[in-house]
Image: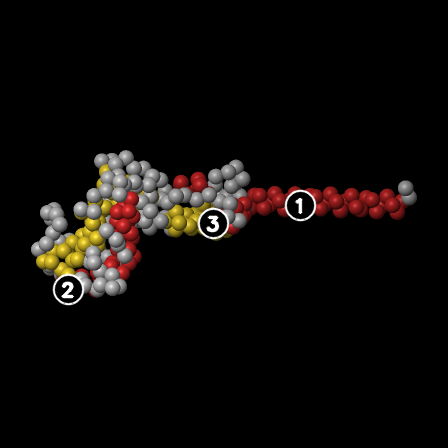
Amino acid sequence: MNGKRKKKLSVRIYHFFTTVIGLAIFVLGVFVLFHIQDVVVTGNTYTDTNQIIETVRDDPYSINTLYVMGKYKLGKGQSLETLDKIKVGIKNPWTLKITVTEKPIVGYIEMSDGYAYLDINGLVVYKHHELLPDVPRIEGISGEGLQVGDTLEATDKQLLQQILLATDEARKKELPVERVMNIENSVYLIMGNIYIKLGQEVSEEQIAQIAPILPNLEGEEGTLHLENYSEDNDTITFKRGEFPIQIE
């Protein structure tokens, strides 16, 4: 091997090693710079922050912000039953940003060991010994022993579905519902001394009639009958002093 060939080989070896060293420095820099030092969670009100963080960082490689973000961008990340959506991004290279959207709470069941809060499907998304404000109480359905992640069961599943539908529609319309009751297999919404009878089949159209009527019922006591209301029958009656049960 002549001198020129030796020189070319030396240059190639030099370039190879400098490239390898450069890549190693780059990888090490990425590893150190994007090593998770802080996690910011927003959007949760009842889901535990630490539980969200543990779910997002659920494998040994989840120490790097780029890795975790990429995992969720590809749809490979885990979520929780209480969450509708979970979005993972980077606030800065070493800070992971988690934004969640929780499943809306439509009502609660009172039990001997606290209150179980339900979503539209009857899933227990939160349980606590204190009451959350502006959440209606669901009565006439037993839920003893429920834990977070359990689904409320009932002998009459159709009736339970209608109760949950009524509470969800009332929530969307921002109605001041205090209680939702099953009385003789009929769904009632209770607001103070006003009982609203929806019947066995609840519709969005029924719930939409309530808000415009409420101002006219201020100071009244009785039952508003919407159980027969439909597109083909727009008859709505209010029976003053009529109550399906004794007012508590």
**Label 3, label 1: how many angstroms apart (C-alpha)?**
27 Å
Q: Nearer the viewer, mark 3 or mark 1?
A: 3
Q: Residue at x 75, y 45 (%)?
A: 16
Horizontally, residue 37 falls left or right of residue 152, namely right
* In the image, farthest residue toward the front: 232
Q: Is residue 238 left or right of residue 77?
A: left
According to the picture, the residue beneath numbered tag 2 turns out to be: 216
Quadrant of the image occupied by residue 61: top right
Residue 112: give x, y in percent of width and height: 22, 35
At mark 3, the secondary structure is strand
Mark 3 — residue?
Answer: 88
* Res. 220 in view: yes
Res 146 label: none
Between marks 2 and 3, how big is the CA–CA gap? Answer: 48 Å
Mark sitting earlier along the chain (1/2): 1
Q: CA distance from mark 1 to mark 2?
A: 75 Å
Indicate the amino acid at tag 1.
Leu
Point out residue 223 in the picture as x, y percentages from the top left corner. Answer: 14, 56
Q: Is residue 227 above or below residue 184?
A: below
